[in-house]
Image: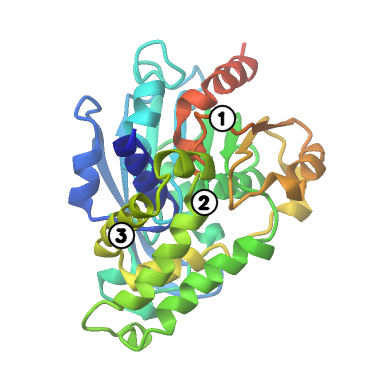
């Protein structure tokens, strides 16, 4: 049980707010999912704030094969969007992929064409740690969605999506997709987020984590020669709290000694695989996010799921119940706390919400 919880917590940190080496992620990928690597470069990509990069490199993984309808449009492509600090491998974790990708499962790869991108600032796509450091353009979610759209159209020649499923940051991007390109997808499945400006405690802990790094003298405005370990330690401490599942932590670490050993282990692993500048960028990418004023423009059916033990999206705020009615075809589900939920990381534990997804896909299937 302890090994399982460590794996889930590490997954949360990867998918939420940490960036592991490509080798580490590749080692976590189940060998039975033989993905195809893809790359697409966008020349002179223009960011929303006016900045430009000469070449924006985007990396992605795919499973399955695209299919086109009688009119020549793709009709089986599913875009799977990872969380902040994650990458294309994040949703290949067995708790997600083994439950969804196999024969007869909701995302059966003999039926669907699955696309898992590395977002800007993540994985093998262009990011500050490639060399520009803090001179890298200050991207946000609008830039990420715009680049995904270009990559799909020009790189993969996918002109329509059966579904967009996004977790955490990918959840927020799903709402951006629905407002920006409302006809591009048949349906949306945003898991573990709120479609409002990031404020209150959500922005607070993110800001605190960023300030931990910036306040470390070793950071040197991003031009460090040795990692700002103390700043990264403070930031990672906040991530463990934000991504934790209280029920599971109490059950699996009931003594002081067990808790402290667990924290030391998980924090050390996180620091070892986190670049401070990349962290600052991807945590701050949510700064302009606020789809609330235009939710009524999301015409695609929406399956929106949060979990009741999510520190980042606490149910007591009552936000989903107020906003779900603003979208014409949206359904919100709050997963109650149970031995199966994993706090914010419930978004990746597919067995918890699989049946809701099956019902949603059946409901939105074109006849």
Q: Nearer the viewer, residue 262 or 282?
A: 262
> Could you tell whether 169 is left or right of 336 in the image?
left
Left or right: residue 16 versus residue 37 is right
Q: Is residue 199 shown above or below 171?
A: below
Q: Nearer the viewer, residue 142 or 210?
A: 210
Residue positioned 49% across, 56% down in the render: 241
Q: Position of residue 240 (x, y in %)?
A: 44, 56
> Alpha-carbon distance for marks 3 and 2?
26 Å
**How many C-alpha atoms fall within 10 Å of the one at disc 3: few (<14), some, or many (≥20)?**
few
Q: Nearer the viewer, residue 220 or 157?
A: 220
Q: Judge the density around disc 2: few (<14), some (14-19), many (≥20) Cα neighbours within 10 Å.
A: many
Write down the quadrant of residue 192 in the picture.
Answer: top right
Name the residue rendered at 66%, 49% in the picture. Answer: 314
Which residue is denoted by mark 2 in the rendering?
Answer: 169
Give the residue number, with chain letter if any, for mark 3: 264
Q: Position of residue 163 (x, y in %)?
A: 53, 30
Residue at 25 percent across and 46 percent down: it is 25
Q: Is residue 345 above or below residue 147?
A: above
Residue holding disc 1:
338
Which mark lies nearer to you, 3 or 2?
3
Residue depicted at 39% across the width and 46% down the height: 9
Instruction: For the residues labelled 3 and 1, say whether their Cβ atoms are less than 8 Å apart.
Output: no
Say if mark 3 contacts mark 2, CB within 8 Å. no
- Residue 15, image x, y percentages: 41, 48
Residue 156 appears in the figure = no
Q: Earlier in the sequence, mark 3 or mark 2?
A: 2
State whether residue 331 appears in this view.
yes
| Foreground residue among 203 and 116 | 203
Spatial CA distance of label 3 from label 1 is 26 Å
Q: Which quarter of the rendered picture does the N terminus lie within?
A: top left
C-alpha separation, residue under disc 1 versus residue under disc 2? 24 Å
């Amino acid at each position: 049980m302890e090994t399982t919880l460590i794996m889930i917590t590490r997954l949360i940190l990867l998918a939420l707010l940490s960036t592991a080496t490509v080798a580490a992620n590749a080692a976590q990928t189940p060998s039975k999912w033989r993905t195809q690597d893809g790359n697409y470069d966008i020349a002179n990509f223009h960011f929303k704030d006016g900045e430009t990069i000469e070449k924006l490199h985007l990396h992605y993984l795919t499973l399955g094969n695209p299919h086109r309808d009688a009119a020549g449009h793709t009709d089986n492509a599913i875009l799977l969007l990872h969380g902040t600090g994650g990458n294309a491998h994040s949703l290949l974790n067995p708790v997600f992929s083994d439950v969804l990708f196999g024969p007869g499962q909701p995302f059966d790869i003999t039926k669907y064409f699955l696309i898992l991108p590395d977002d800007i600032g993540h994985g093998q796509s262009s990011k500050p740690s490639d060399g520009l450091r803090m001179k890298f353009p200050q991207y946000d979610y609008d830039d990420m969605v715009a680049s995904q759209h270009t990559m799909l159209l020009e790189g993969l020649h996918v002109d329509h999506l059966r579904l967009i499923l996004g977790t955490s940051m990918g959840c927020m991007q799903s709402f951006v997709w629905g407002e920006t390109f409302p006809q591009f997808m048949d349906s949306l499945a945003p898991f573990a987020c709120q479609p409002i400006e990031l404020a209150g405690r959500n922005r607070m802990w993110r800001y605190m984590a960023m300030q931990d790094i910036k306040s470390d003298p070793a950071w040197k405005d991003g031009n460090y020669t040795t990692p700002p370990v103390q700043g990264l330690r403070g930031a990672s401490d906040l991530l463990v709290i934000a991504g934790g599942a209280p029920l599971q932590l109490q059950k699996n670490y009931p003594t002081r000694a067990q808790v402290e050993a667990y924290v030391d282990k998980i924090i050390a692993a996180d620091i070892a695989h986190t670049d401070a500048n990349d962290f600052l960028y991807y945590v701050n990418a949510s700064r302009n996010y606020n789809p609330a004023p235009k939710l009524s423009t999301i015409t695609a059916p929406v399956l929106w799921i949060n979990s009741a033990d999510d520190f980042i999206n606490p149910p007591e705020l009552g936000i989903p119940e107020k906003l779900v009615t603003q979208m014409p075809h949206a359904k919100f589900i709050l997963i109650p706390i149970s031995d199966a939920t994993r706090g914010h990381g419930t978004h990746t534990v597919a067995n918890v919400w699989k049946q809701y997804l099956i019902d949603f896909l059946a409901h939105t299937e074109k006849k």
